[in-house]
Structures are given as structure tokens and as C-alpha cells.
Image (spheres, helix red, strand yellow):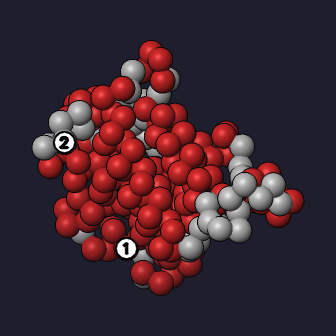
Amino acid sequence: MMQDPETRPSLIGQLHDPASHDAWAEFVGLYQPVVYRVARGRGLQHADAEDIAQDVFATVGRKVGEFDLGRCGSFRGWLLKITRDQVVNKLTRGPRDVGSGDSEVQAMLGEQPARSETLTLLRVEHQRALLARAAERLRGSISPPIWDAFWITAVEGISIAEAAERLGKTEGSVRVARCRVLARLRKEVQDHDCPFSL
């Protein structure tokens, strides 16, 4: 539906300054739900996933000055590595896990997803966060009948035929409304959340 999400280089540049509260608030607002969902997707409980998010942002704060696109690859890959490291650390910490060499611990580590699987999850969650932010910005500027046609078909997954019946519209008008909102959402994401490869 959307291009791969991207992060503005200006935002990353502002993160070098810990006093840049607006940049950090934007960064955390954008990525906290992403990191949280990745942690939950790896089997962590709610509180542990929240701890992971805090640990990831603390690590980014300490190390963002060291981030070098040429050496570290993409910002997305760098953030992925930090997130994955924090999840693995959380799963292997604790009195029963430390240095045990226990087969249960080894099995838990073996269940950790490959880097590509985690990267895919990170991309999906980031796209979800970008879409949610764009939808919040746009919703007030789109008439409720058009928004409803988009929302129940694209987000809730209701068929075009059922949505048309529910809304008292033709299937064609529901399709058009959905396409218009999707096009505006794509543009909103591209205009506000790009262009630096995350």
C-alpha cells in the first residue's frame, strides 16, 4: 500500500542534541509503538515491552552520535539491531537464565527470529505507526461518509459490497471514497515522514 517508511535526516540530526525536546518527542512518538509491538511480537509481556522501548530510546540517545550511514547501514537496520539486542537481553536476563547453559534457555534463544523476520516486523509496525499519524492528521479534513467508507473497508476489512449496504451507497462510490483517502494518506506520509531511508 505505502512505500517503505522513511525518517527525515533532519530529525535524526536533531537527536544528536539531547536538549532538542521536540525532536525527541517526535522520534519517541513515532517509534515507541513500533518498538513496543516488536517486543510484544517476540513474546514479551506488556511491562517488559514498555521497558524494552525505554531501553531502546536510552541506547539511541547514547549512541546516535556514533551513527554513520556508511558504516552502520540504514537507520532502520541500526534501530532494528538495538531493538533486537534489547529483546534478546531481556529474554536471557534473570536468575534462572544467567549462565545456566540450560537447554530451555538455548531453546528460547533459538526461537528468536532471524534478522530478516525482525526487520520485516519492524517495517510493518513502522508503516502502521506512520499510517496512524497520517490518519489522525487527515481525519478532520475528510467528510464523515467518505472517511467511514475508507475506514470500514481498508482498516476493518469489511467487503466493498457489505460496506455499500451498511452505508447506503453504491459499491462504486465506496471504492472511489476508499481510493481517494488512500491516495491522500500516501501523500500525507510522503510529505511529512520522509525522505531518509529508515
Q: Residue at x 41, y 21 (%)?
A: 69
97 lies above or below 195: below
Horizontal placement of 66 versus 102: left or right?
A: left
Instruction: Give the quarter of the image for residue 43.
Output: bottom right
Q: Residue furthest top?
A: 70
Q: Dot 1 lies on which element? A: helix
Res. 86 visible in picture: yes
Q: Residues within 10 Å of mark 1 (few under 14, many from 20)?
A: some
Q: CA distance from mark 1 to mark 2?
A: 41 Å
Q: Nearer the viewer, residue 75 or 126?
A: 75
Image spot of residue 141 (x, y percent): 19, 62
Q: Which mark is residue 18?
A: 2
Amino acid type at mark 1: Asp
Q: Which mark is residue 83?
A: none
Q: Are marks 1 and 2 in contact (CB under 8 Å)?
A: no
Q: Residues within 10 Å of mark 2 (few under 14, many from 20)?
A: few
Image spot of residue 105 (x, y percent): 77, 60
Image spot of residue 96 (x, y percent): 71, 68
Q: Residue at x 33, y 68 (%)?
A: 147
Mark 1 vs 2, N-terminal side: 2
Q: Dot 2 lies on which element? A: loop
Front disc: 1 or 2: 2
177 lies above or below 186: below
Q: Residue at x 57, y 47 (%)?
A: 84
Horizontal placement of 55 versus 163: left or right?
A: left
Res. 183 visible in picture: no
Q: Residue at x 13, y 43 (%)?
A: 19
Q: Which residue is mark 1?
A: 148
Amino acid type at mark 2: Pro
